[in-house]
Image: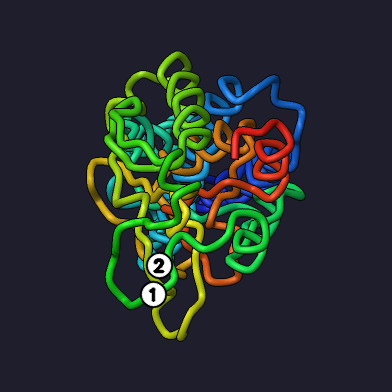
Amino acid sequence: MRVLPAIIVFFGLLLAPAVWIGLTWLLSEEDFQGAAVDSTARIEIEMLRQQIEDLQLRLSDVQNEVARLPIGGSAGLAPNASSAEAEREIWDQTEGADLDYAQVVLIADRLNVNRGLQVTGGKYLTEKLGRPREDLNDNCQPMTNPDLKEKLVTEQVGPIRVSMLRPAIESLKVVFENIRRADPDLYNRINTAGALCVRRIRGTTNSLSTHSYGLAVDLNIDGKLDNFTDGKTQLGLTIMADFFFDEGWVWGAGFRREDSMHFEISRRQLDSWIAEGRL
C-alpha cells in the first residue's frame, strides 16, 4: 500500500501552514523589549524560516517519491516505520545548521523598516549645513567647508575606522557598543565599505548624498558586499538595523532603490544635533 508516504505528506502539509502562520505572527509583533531581545528573536525567526523552506522542499520530494512507488510498499523507509518516525527523520535533516550572519535573507516589510524616520536628503542638508565643498565631480574629494571640516574626525569606532562628523562618530560608538554587548559574535564580523565621500551623486550634475557630509556609513558582514536593489540582505544587517534605529539612523533597505548596506542619520536626529549646537 501507499498509505505511509501519504501520511507523511499529509502531516507535513498540515504542519507547514501552521508553522508559517506562527512565523508571520511573530514577524508582525512589535513588542520586542529593546534591540538586544529583538536581535535574538530575529535570529530564531530567520532560522525557523529556513527550516520551513527546507521542509517544503522535502515535502515536494516526498510527493514525487509517492507518485513513483509500486503498490505494496514504500522505497527508502523501514517496513514498520511509523508516520511520526518518518516525520522526525524529515525534521532531523533541517536542524543543526550553523548560524551565518553573512547569509542572504529577504527583508521583511522592507518599505516600513524605518518606522517613520525620514531621510535628510542633499537639499535639506545644504539648507541646514551648507555645502561640504563647491566644486564636485564623480570622485571623492576633501571637505573644504570650514565649519564642517572643523567637526570632521577620523577614528577607530568599534570594529571599523571611519571619517565622519563628530556627532555621527559619537552616535556610531553607541550603536556598536550596544551590538557588542548584545551579540559579540556579530560585532566581530562587522566590516565597512566606506563613510565620508564628498562627491556628487553619480548620474547627477550637482546633487549631494549624506556620504558627502560624513553622516552615513556603508556596512557589511565579513567584507562581503550585499547586492544592490534585490530586496535581500545579510542576516547580520537586519539585526544591526534595530540598534541603528534606536539611535535615530535610517536604514537604506527601506529606500525605493534598496541599499541595505547603507545607514545614515535621520532628519530628526540631524535637527536634534543642530538644536543642541553640535552641528
Residue 243 locus on image (x, y percent): 55, 31
Residue at x 29%, y 65% (from the top left corner): 140
Q: What element carries label 2?
A: loop
Between 201 and 44, the residue placed more toward the observer is 201
Sequence-wise, the earlier of marks 2 and 1 is 1
Camera-nearest residue between 206 and 131: 131
Give the numbered dot on residue 101.
none
Residue at 28% x, 26% y: name it. Answer: 188
Kindly identify which numbered label has been placed on residue 228: 2
Q: Count residues near mark 2 (Cα–Cα under 10 Å), then give few for <14, some for 14-19, many for 20+.
A: some
Instruction: Judge left or right: residue 238 versus residue 248.
Output: left
Give the residue drawn at x 39%, y 55%. Answer: 72
For mark 1, what is the residue?
135
Q: Which amino acid does label 1 sit on?
A: Asp
* Most distant residue in the left direction: 223
- The residue at 53%/56% (across/down) is 252
User: Considering the image in quadrants, where does the C terminus appear?
Assistant: top right
Residue 79 image position (x, y, % from top left): 34, 38
Residue 153 locus on image (x, y percent): 36, 36
In the depicted structure, whether residue 182 falls above or below residue 234: above
| Badge nearest the viewer, 2 or 1 | 1
Q: In which quarter of the image is residue 169?
A: top left
Question: Which amino acid type is shown beneath numbered disc 2?
Answer: Phe
Q: Position of residue 127 (x, y in %)?
A: 67, 62
Color theme of the render: rainbow
